[in-house]
Image: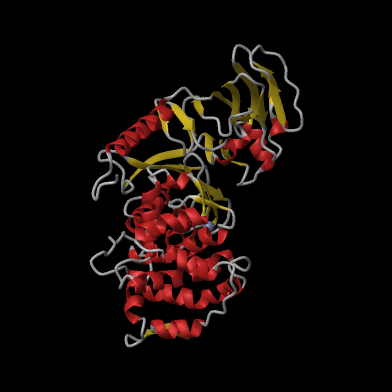
Amino acid sequence: MLGRRGMPLAAIVVLILDAAAAVRAQDAAPDCTAQVDVEMIAARDDVPAGPVLAVAMACRSSVPVQFFGDGSGAAAALKSVRDGADRPIERDGGTWRVPPEAGVATLRYRLDLGALARAISSVSVAVSRGEAVLSVASTWLVEPRWQGTAEPSIDITVKTPPDTVFLAGLPESNGVWRLRGTTVRFMGYTVFGRAQAERLAVPPPAGMSDGDQAYIDLAILNGDFDVARGDLVEWVRRTALMTAGYWDGFTNRRMLVALLPSPGRRGVGYGRTVPGGGSTVMVQVGERSSRADLQNDWVLPHEFVHTGMPFLRGNGTWFMEGAATYVEPIVRARAGWKTEAEVWREWIENMPRGLSALDSGLEGGSAYWGGALFFLMADIEIRRATAGAKGVEDCFRGARHEGGVMTPTQRWTVGEYVGRCDKALGAPLMAGMVARYVGTSHRIDLDALWRDLGVRLDGTTITTDDAAPLAAIRKIIVAGPPGRMQQKVPPLAN
Ligand SMILES: [Zn+2]
């Protein structure tokens, strides 16, 4: 029945109905609504002002709803917990159970988020700087669950006092933030209170319709930085630009990036990406950092690689960290922030750290360098098999394109990722690499690999040999194929 070209009418009708259903799912009345009223408690003694939240979550259900509090201690901090009829509800462990009334189960509570963040002070739960709090959503928002509903949709509205912000990575329209297709636990970072916020326009991801805007909401929490605020903004904007060059448009149509000052420290610290429902990135920035420290650091471009991929569940850590570790120096080199020789030097010095991971079939050892070594070999294999026409960037861009622009907010298996990557490559090249190296011990001869590529490190100097068998591939791995050169991005420091 399938014609040689095009698809049968029935299939087209089904596709149109699916698209309509998808639009309806976005617009449909949500399973739950959460109303959040923020109040800034005034500063007293040496305690700065901070946000206190009054939350009312209501879920449409015919059976009792369990509202789960965060396991990190936040559940115990919820005060005045009541149902829709203003009756107190007892906590059972970290859970409140509310039977529906007229088809709606409601939980109300208050939380002094500022006090909680000062007490916990953890970048993976909640942390305070000045009069702002950076926290994952599950710290302040209970997670509703009831029989028959796995991931209830939640529309969140937040009322903030003047001169304060609320920021999240979720899609937002007309003041409503929409959580879809994931749970509160994976919803990512949020910012409340007084922080510098700026919306940065970025090149839209490939596949987005014309006229759609893509942006980063950047929040800079209060700190005594040596560099100007404008330098921090430019650092994030230019890192997004170089990322967009590699990915053919930025990785997401919207994103929250939060910079958390580290008092008295120099350099960029820990970074973390949490993508559920919408991408969010947290990066610690030492207050004593210079522009050169920011420019020469790997953490933010590394996190931005993560934001181009879904979270890979199961044994996906080596794949995610390997991709980010391998791609990050390439992104910076293609933008002109690093030389090709510096990239090879970094690889020759560090790839030995991945040998034990390959030896264990990528089930142990360093997920970062084991994964990076895997991707170097995969990149060589893809370029060899396609006579230089394609490389790993086509795998990464292709998987996102196959999965749609919301891909980075989803959770896939490695197998699902590899299938979509190979569809874009036009051959099961990545599947072949995974079958060869995952679960099977391999001793990699790195000296032979560098010799075949024609690259050598003498002391601190890189020398190359264009007569080596893989020299042609070596030349396009870092710089990209001729004719597809990436736009340079002006450096931050000279
Ligand atoms: Zn990482």
Classify 203 as above or below 374: above
- The spot of residue 185 in percent (x, y) is 60, 39
The residue drawn where x is 39% and y is 30% is: 21
The residue drawn where x is 44% and y is 82% is: 450
Quarter holding the N terminus? top left
Tell me if I can see residue 267 in this picture: no
342 or 375: which is nearer to us? 375
Is residue 432 shown left or right of residue 152?
A: left
Residue extending furthest front?
A: 1
- The spot of residue 153 in percent (x, y) is 52, 30
Disc tally is 0
How was the colour assigned to the protein in this rendering? secondary structure
Is residue 12 shown left or right of residue 105?
A: left
The residue drawn where x is 38% and y is 45% is: 404
- The spot of residue 285 in percent (x, y) is 52, 53
Is residue 316 shown left or right of residue 296?
A: right
Quarter holding the C terminus? bottom left
- The spot of residue 389 in percent (x, y) is 29, 68
Tell me if I can see residue 135 in this picture: yes
Is residue 152 shown left or right of residue 476?
A: right
Classify 142 as above or below 464: above
137 or 364: which is nearer to us? 364
